[in-house]
Image (spheres, coloured by chain):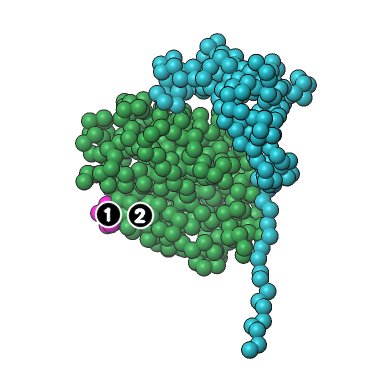
Chain colours: A cyan, B green
């Protein structure tokens, strides 16, 4: 029996470019200004239900109370407790930079000292044997002249002994 | 099963070419707070469900409704999203109520066109394997449709320009309008050409903003306001995506949607029975074409219709007394803002642009390339 001739597979290759310039809005904008100018991480609290927000919220997500009075903001961290984490072993194309992710790459949810709020950020440590939920970590900031007013003003959280 | 759906209140932001101090969610927060106050209700206790309209690609995030529950106090409540156009959110919000599932629904839409490049986003909506790489966007497609419409029915550039003159002029009386101007037909014809016959004045400007309304059962609507607006009819219809698959000089989908809505509302003679029309004209020629699809004039007579003066603010059937989309409304919010304007007209709350004694209104939203899909709502007080 003769084999059927192979059809040429036709497909379309396309990479899409997505240019955006997003507004941060005021509470988030101020949060980033504080990261940039003062290497400070801020949170705030709902005056009605007591829930904390980091970055600060202007409206409580639970009961809609107004929250955004700057003088009621509190600085949290830069140290905290690691709650949980992931370590990524499989590299992939980062859509925002167009580069391949350097692996292993670890990110943790850190409960910052001062308020029950979490910050999600990269961890310096990437060895699963050396990362333990409950361990103390500390934010490492870029030098002031390199800070731009975004989440990368913090480089990562390093493990500390306390 | 509830009988009718009432619109209790509506709210919108002032539309602007950019709102750099507000996060997308804060646009929603602004109109949510405004409409809740206007309706005299509690966001926490009275709103049972939120139906939002936003476009993932315009926002730059998939599931663009993700921040909505945070700012509408809707954690652990029913929240759903529709894309396309804000008029569809009103339609689905009404369905929530007609189903008996919810008694009071917050409907909201937002978009900040200034965040990105509309040409790219519009290009993405186009068939990805056959047409997109030709470099089409909505303006270029509109130029094709306008050309076809003008050729088939001898619509003139002056007739099309009259839409811009009328709507930009009407916008002067609208405090929410982004842009208004006193123009002559010549001003429009002489303005910068984007893609013949579409000039920069023929296209709606880039805009940021949001809109919201409160829908409720008849019983609750009557308790909350002495001026409830009833949804009397609704119709929704889609044309094919590929421009070559339909007659661009006609709008069969709109005609079908309008017929459905009119039948439901018991309208036999739209021109005589309807008091005001708020339609979605992304490009000036579309107002002429949509008035045909809405059955206000015969096929091919959209140009004659605007020449007649009937659609002027002081005419027999004012079309876009608000200033329409040409005054500056973002995509997505567009159709919902038409409903909001119609609601205000029927409630006697349209300020200087009020059409006296308005009792029956048509609000129209559309989406997709060259108005691929249309939603028609008939509203009455």
Q: Which residue is labeled 1 in the image? A: B264
- Quarter occupied by residue B38: top left
Start-end of magenta stretch: B263-268
Residue placed most toward the observer, A76 or B222: A76
Q: Residue at x 55, y 64 (%)?
A: B243
Residue B257 appears left or right of B168: left
**Disc 1 and disc 2 in contact, CB within 8 angstroms:** yes
The quadrant of the rendering that contains the C terminus of chain A is top right
Residue B37 appears left or right of B156: left
Badge 2 element: strand
Q: Residue at x 42, y 37 (%)?
A: B108
In the image, residue B60 lies at what x, y percent?
A: 59, 42
Residue B250 appears left or right of B139: left
Residue placed most toward the observer, B22 or B380: B22
Q: Residue at x 36, y 46 (%)?
A: B92
Q: Residue at x 46, y 30 (%)?
A: B70
In the image, residue B305 lies at what x, y percent?
A: 43, 55
Whether residue A118 is visible to the viewer of this picture, yes or no, is: yes
Asked if badge 1 and badge 2 are on a common chain, one would say yes
- Against A8, residue A22 (above or below) is above
- Against B70, residue B4 (above or below) is below
Which numbered dot is residue B235? 2
Is A90 within the magenta? no
């Amino acid at each position: 029996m003769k084999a059927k001739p192979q059809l040429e597979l036709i497909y379309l290759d396309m990479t899409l470019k997505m240019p955006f310039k997003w507004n941060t809005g005021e509470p988030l904008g101020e949060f980033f200004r504080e990261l940039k100018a003062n290497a400070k991480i801020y949170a705030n609290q709902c005056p009605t239900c007591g829930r904390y927000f980091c970055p600060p919220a202007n409206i409580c997500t639970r009961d809609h109370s107004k929250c955004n009075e700057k003088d009621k903001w509190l600085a949290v961290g830069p140290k905290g407790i690691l709650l949980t984490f992931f370590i990524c072993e499989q590299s992939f194309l980062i859509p925002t930079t167009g580069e391949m992710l350097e692996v292993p790459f670890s990110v943790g949810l850190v409960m910052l000292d001062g308020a029950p709020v979490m910050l999600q950020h990269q961890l310096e440590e990437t060895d699963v044997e050396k990362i333990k939920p409950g361990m103390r970590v500390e934010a490492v900031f870029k030098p002031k002249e390199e800070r731009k007013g975004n989440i990368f003003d913090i480089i990562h959280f390093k493990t500390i002994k306390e | 099963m509830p009988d009718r759906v009432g619109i209790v209140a509506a709210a919108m932001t002032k539309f602007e070419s950019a709102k750099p101090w507000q996060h997308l969610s804060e646009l929603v927060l602004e109109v949510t707070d405004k409409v809740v106050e206007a309706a005299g209700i509690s966001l926490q206790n009275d709103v049972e469900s939120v139906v939002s309209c936003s476009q993932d690609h315009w926002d730059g995030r998939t599931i663009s409704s993700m921040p909505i529950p945070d700012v509408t106090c809707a954690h652990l409540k029913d929240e759903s999203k529709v894309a396309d156009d804000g008029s569809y959110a009103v339609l689905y919000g009404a369905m929530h109520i007609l189903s008996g599932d919810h008694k009071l629904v917050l409907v909201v839409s937002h978009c900040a066109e200034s965040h990105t490049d509309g040409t790219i986003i519009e290009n993405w909506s186009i068939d990805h394997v056959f047409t997109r790489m030709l470099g089409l966007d909505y303006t270029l497609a509109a130029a094709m449709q306008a050309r076809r419409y003008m050729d088939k029915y001898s619509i003139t550039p002056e007739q099309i320009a009259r839409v811009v003159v009328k709507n930009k002029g009407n916008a002067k009386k609208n405090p929410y309008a982004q842009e208004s101007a006193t123009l002559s037909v010549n001003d429009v014809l002489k303005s910068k050409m984007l893609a013949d016959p579409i000039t920069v004045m023929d296209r709606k400007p880039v805009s940021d903003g949001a809109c919201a309304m409160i829908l409720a059962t008849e019983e609750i609507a009557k308790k909350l306001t002495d001026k409830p607006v009833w949804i009397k009819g609704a119709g929704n219809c889609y044309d094919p995506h590929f421009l070559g698959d339909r007659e661009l000089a006609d709008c069969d989908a709109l005609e079908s949607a309008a017929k459905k809505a009119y039948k439901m509302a018991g309208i036999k003679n739209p021109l005589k029975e309807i008091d005001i029309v708020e339609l979605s004209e992304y490009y000036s020629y579309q107002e002429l074409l949509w008035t045909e699809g809405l059955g206000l004039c015969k096929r091919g007579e959209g140009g004659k219709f605007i020449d007649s003066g009937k659609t002027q603010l002081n005419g027999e059937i004012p079309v876009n007394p608000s200033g329409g989309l040409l005054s500056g409304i973002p995509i997505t919010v567009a159709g919902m803002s038409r409903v909001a304007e119609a609601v205000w007209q029927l409630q006697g709350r349209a300020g200087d642009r009020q059409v006296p004694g308005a009792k029956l209104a048509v609000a129209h939203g559309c989406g997709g390339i060259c108005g691929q899909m249309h939603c028609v709502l008939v509203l009455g007080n």
